[in-house]
Image (tube, grey):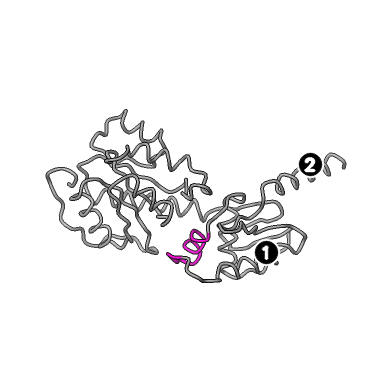
Amino acid sequence: MWGGKSYAPRPIGGMINRDRATILLIEEDDATRTFLADHLTADGYDMLVADSARDGIRHLETSYPDLALVDVNLPDSSGLDLVSHVREADGVASRIDPQVPLMLLSERCGELDRVRGFERGADDVVEKPFSYRELRCRVEALLRRADRSRSGGRLRVADIELDTASRTALLGGSVLELSAKEFALLRVLAADPTRVFTKAELLRTVWGRRTVGTTRTLDSHACRLRRKLGAEGGRYVVNVWGVGYRLVDAPALVDERALREELVLAA
């Protein structure tokens, strides 16, 4: 057990095969923070660590972790308030992904405490002291669930339709010839079509890069994708100057839907 007075030996093996995920650990206690960071790193995760809500939010805004472990008792704020802050983010002005999986670590884990955590937006609540092996399994389960949510099913935005299982894209019923990265970029944008995705987010999600630097990779792919999607006169892959890209402007999407409704009524 860890988080109390008993300790667990370092686990050996047991990890699932997957790309390296990044975990943000926001934990006040030095010993617990070091223990979890060391063990999760040994198990193949890239770790970001913070000892306060302020530093944790900074990482959420700039590093875009795949999952965050949040101590309920932080020195400058409650972990519950941090969870609420994340879930209330718009993903644009705050630059926090409101959908990032969040696991609370709490010394108080009665029914009311767990319910309060879930009501604030936590995906899981783990009691201290905890079994490391159980915590690791819970982390893997949350990451699998988040990955399925991002990659499964069909997406439709105006005349664009994506089938993520077969990796095909249609525009007005016609197949689009897209490269693997163009498809991946379109899939990310289509998941939340009016949201502005920062360049750092897109480079990290599509290309796996941690820093923006001076690369023109994203801009060149966005330009080619825009040309292909604009074949039928649509305005897609909108460049939000100084921030990033979104798939479509909200007014344009609304106007197109209204026009379609008018055509159906006229017919």
* 143 vs 233, nearest the viewer: 233
32 lies above or below 21: above
Q: Please tell me how crowded label 2 is: few (under 14), some (14-19), or many (20+) other residues with Cα within 10 Å.
A: few
Rendered residue at 35%/55% (across/down)? 23
Rendered residue at 41%/33% (across/down)? 119
Where does residue 73 sit, x and y in percent of width and height? 27, 38
Are discs 2 and 1 less than 8 Å apart at CB?
A: no
Rendered residue at 74%/57% (across/down)? 234
Alpha carbon separation for disc pair 2 and 1: 26 Å
Whether the magenta-drawn stretch holds residue 56 is answered as: no
> Left or right: where does residue 191 sit relative to residue 112?
right
Residue 169, picture quadrant: bottom right
> Left or right: where does residue 17 sit relative to residue 187?
left
Kindly state the secondary structure of the residue where label 2 is placed. Answer: helix
Amino acid type, residue under disc 1 in the picture: Arg
Amino acid type, residue under disc 2 in the picture: Glu
Mark 1 highlights which residue?
226
Q: Please tell me how crowded label 1 is: few (under 14), some (14-19), or many (20+) other residues with Cα within 10 Å.
A: many
Mark 2 highlights which residue?
261
Kindly state the secondary structure of the residue where label 1 is placed. Answer: helix
Whether the magenta-drawn stretch holds residue 203 is answered as: yes
> Left or right: where does residue 77 sit relative to residue 98?
left
Q: Nearer the viewer, mark 2 or mark 1?
A: 1
* 180 vs 248, nearest the viewer: 248
Where does residue 67 sit, x and y in percent of width and height? 38, 51
Residue 165, picture quadrant: bottom right
Magenta region: which residues?
199-211
127 lies above or below 183: above
* 155 vs 57, nearest the viewer: 57
